[in-house]
Every structure is written in C-alpha cells, then in structure tokens.
Amino acid sequence: MAHAPATAARHTPTSHYLRCEGRELHVTEWGRADAPPVIMWHGLARTGRDFDELAQALADDYRIICPDTIGRGLSQWSPDPVAEYRLDFYARLARALADSLSLARLRWVGTSMGGATGMHAAATTLRDRISHLVVNDIGPELPQPAIDRILAYAGNPPAFDTVTELEAWLRVAYKPYGWQSDAQWRRMAETSVRRLPDGRVTAHYDPAIVGQFSHHPGDYDRWTGYDSLRMPVLLLRGADSDLLLPDVAHAMTQRGPCAKRIDFPDCGHAPALNVAPQIDAVRQFLATPDLTATARAH
C-alpha cells in the first residue's frame, strides 16, 4: 500500500542530556517550551527518534519530549542491569524526568515497552500527573510466543560491516511496524547504529536489556495497576499484532479506564505512528479536555 509522508519537515528538534536517578538520559525535544508537554516513550530496543514523524506533526501544539531509555540510544548504559532494566526503574526515570523539567501535568504516548512504562508510571510514580495516556500495541499481559520472537532478534543483535547491511536487517526485523518510506528506514538505521571495537556496526542498545524477561519474568503482568487507572486511555493496535492479542485488547476496553481502541490495518507490532491515520488518531485524542484538571478547578 502506498502512503504519502504524514507531514512536511518544519520543526527542528533539540538534543539534551539530563541526570535522572543518577543516570544520564538523552532526550530529543520538539516544539515550544511553554506548550502542553507530551512524553513519548519508545519500545524495548528502540530510541526516542522513532517518534520523529509524530513529534513533527504535533510540535505546533505541544512540547514533545522523547527520551532514550537507559541502555538505549545516546543514554547511559546501566552499571546495574538486573536492577535497572525493568519497569519499576523506568517508571522512576519517568518521574525524575518529569520533575527535572517541572512537568506537573503531562500527556503520555508509549509504544510497546513505552506503553507498559506509561501504564505503570500512571499507576505509581506519576499517578495523578498523566492526563492522557496513549498505549501503542501492548497490554497488561503478554503472550510468550511474541516475547520469544522479540528476544530472537533483540537478545543477540548481529554485527555488520556496513550501515547499509544494518538497514537491511532492520527492514526485516521491524517489518511489522508497517509502511515506512525509504528515508524513514534510513533514519532508523542511522539512529540505531553503534560501532564495535572491530569496526563493524550493530544496534544501538545494551544487549543486557533483554534480561528483564528472565530476571523479572512477571514484569509485564500489570492488570492490577491498569485497573486502577482513571485517566482517558487510547489503545492502538496493529491488526496483525502478535503481542497485543484481540482478547486482551478487548478486556482493556471493558475494565479499569475502559480504553478507547483503534486497530490499524497493514501492520503488526507495533504501528510506527508515522502515517496520517495513526497520527490523526493520536492528535484527536490528545486534544480532548483534561477532565481531571477541570474537575479540580471546580
């Protein structure tokens, strides 16, 4: 299926390094500093640059904050991976990030692990501070076959002689994201690369991040926290997703915050949020009133 680019390039992001929970986080920001803030948190083995198209499209109206999780991208690798590559610590990082930027209220868009981090933070470290929660293709329980698939490519990232070869590998590994332009695939490669001592290139993250699934096997079992949420939740799902199964997605619309669900065709896990229908769904949801803040004001 052919797609037109979702938006023209108009905004230039800025790059920052912040100290959060004793670790250095890299953050890409878009938009005005005085605009309503939106944190966009990426998936397991990705970076905040995955949100470039969405951030570009929303930067007229919001301050977009896209961190690289510890162990990914330009953020510090953890010296204590067993303790820190897990949702509890990511939620603490999220609070420290919000505190360092003086964000009393914020919107959250999270893809995969970033959605799980958002749900967990909304129930704990950022409770009563997240006004709108977008959860992109993840639920409060995960099917083991999908975890095994992800571990197969993320747990032992291959090394290549050239960035072109890395891009070709990424196109296969992340094919479930759905359509991306050649330029977007190239950017994914260029923001996903680190060079090894032998001169070859590999993916940008600490391979120890996948230890989360063996050291903390119940880390993504989060129905109790989900059921406690009261803010509006938008649940996005790739129609062919193997990570967010239809019965789990349906349950998320019936319990807890009773999420609004949208399934997108022609993609699996997870929609890349880079084409107009996906961007428009997020835009419309984020523009809805902050009902909790309104109630407090009265």
Image (tube, rainbow, N blue to C red):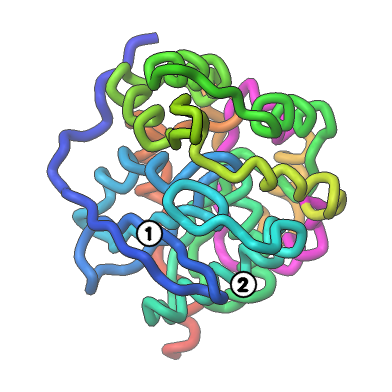
**Element under disc 1:** strand
Q: Position of residue 74 (x, y in %)?
A: 42, 51
Quarter of the rendering containing residue 102: bottom left
In terms of secondary structure, where does tag 2 sit?
Answer: helix
Decide which of tag 2 and tag 1 comes sooner along the chain.
Answer: 1
Residue at left offset 60%, top offset 45%: 206
At x 80%, y 54%, the residue is 219
Residue 269 lies, in percent from the top left, at 60, 29
Residue 43 as seen in the image, left or right of residue 214? left
Considering depth in this image, is 86 or 10 the residue closer to the camera? 86
- The residue that mark 1 highlights is 27
Q: Which residue is mark 2?
A: 92
Above/below status of 290 relative to 168: below
Q: Which residues are magenta?
A: 220-245
Quarter of the view holding residue 185: top left
Asked if disc 2 and disc 1 are in contact, CB closer than 8 Å, the reply is: no
Q: Is residue 257 magenta?
A: no
Neighbour tally class for label 2: few under 14, some 14-19, many 20 plus, Cα within 10 Å:
many
Amino acid on which the number 2 mark rests in the picture: Arg
Q: Is residue 142 left or right of residue 184?
A: right
What residue sits 57% from the left and 40% below the top? 45
Above-or-below relation of 232 to 167 = below
Q: Against 71, is 238 above or below? A: above
On-image quarter of the N terminus: top left
**Does residue 287 show up?**
no
| Residue 76 place in picture, x, y as percent | 51, 58
Horizontal placement of 192 versus 287: left or right? right
Instruction: Estimate the spatial distance between the alpha carbons at disc 2 and disc 1, rounded to whole Å.
Output: 16 Å
Tell me where residue 105 sits by quadrant. Answer: bottom left
